[in-house]
Image (cartoon, rainbow, N blue to C red):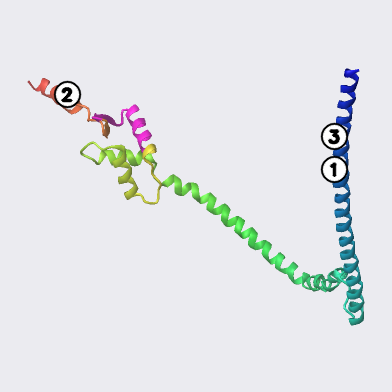
Amino acid sequence: MSIMSETTAETTELTSQYSTQVAGDLERNLKEQERLSGEIEALQAQLAALRHDHTVLVNIQQALGIPAPAAPAAEPVATVPAPRKKAAKAPGAAKQTKDKKPAAADRKQTSKKSTATAPTTSSLSPTLVDLVREHLAGQSEPRSAAEITTALGQQHPERTIKATVVRTTLEGLVAKNQAQRTRQGRAVFYTTPAPAAEPTTSGEAQDGPAE
């Protein structure tokens, strides 16, 4: 009998707890409904006032003769005469285009002439290899690639001469035995190759028969 009484006591406590929770939830639910219904009524009242003001403003607008805002379609009608004026000017424009065509043809011909003359001018100008070789030939002391680049840039300011290109050109001349390369520490200098000793040998050959 004691066990039955304990179980009934537990069930009554649980039911009382659930009942209090449900009652609290119902109260909160009712308060939330009241709050939302009040907000809805306020919004409906604002909407009704706005609709009333809208009808009043529309009536005033009609009484004043002001066109409705939906009349932007009338703007293209105002801009219709513009293409007609352009059409009236079309013959003159056609004449101008006819006159411009020969000018364009003349420009093409001049551009062709300039392109045709460009190779001739470039062919007359000496190459970088020739400039480097002539510069080395005119120097009595070894010169570095940077010194040769600055000297050639001063002599030929119309040309863009880079030190890397000059260095590769010098190495090409060295490979062809048209220049000599010497090192002084980490610096590299270039000179023209020493002339061969052909005159001395020929002189000895001439002196031999004379003896």
**Pair 1/3: label in front:** 3
Q: Amino acid at mark 1?
A: Gly
> Alpha-carbon distance for marks 1 and 2?
128 Å
Residue name at image x 81 percent, y 70 percent: 83
Q: Nearer the viewer, residue 20 or 106?
A: 20
| Residue identifier under label 1 | 24
**Pair 2/3: label in front:** 3
Q: Circle 3: is it few (<14), some (14-19), or many (20+) Cα within 10 Å? A: few
Look at the numbered discs 1 and 2 and tell me whether their residues touch, using CB distance below 8 Å: no
Q: Circle 1: is it few (<14), some (14-19), or many (20+) Cα within 10 Å? A: few
Q: Nearer the viewer, residue 135 or 21?
A: 21
Quarter containing the C terminus: top left
Q: Residue 20: where, in percent of width, then height?
A: 86, 39
| Residue identifier under label 3 | 17
Q: Is residue 178 magenta?
A: yes
Horizontal placement of 37 versus 96: left or right?
right
Horizontal placement of 104 versus 127: left or right?
right
Q: Nearer the viewer, residue 188 or 134?
A: 188
Question: Quarter-wise, where is residue 87 in the image?
Answer: bottom right
In magenta, the rendered stretch is 166-185
Residue name at image x 91 percent, y 71 percent: 52
Q: Residue 204: where, in percent of width, then height?
A: 13, 23
Q: Residue 91: where, in percent of width, then height?
A: 77, 70
| Residue identifier under label 2 | 201
Marking on residue 191: none
Q: Amino acid at mark 2?
A: Thr
Q: Secondary structure at mark 2?
A: helix
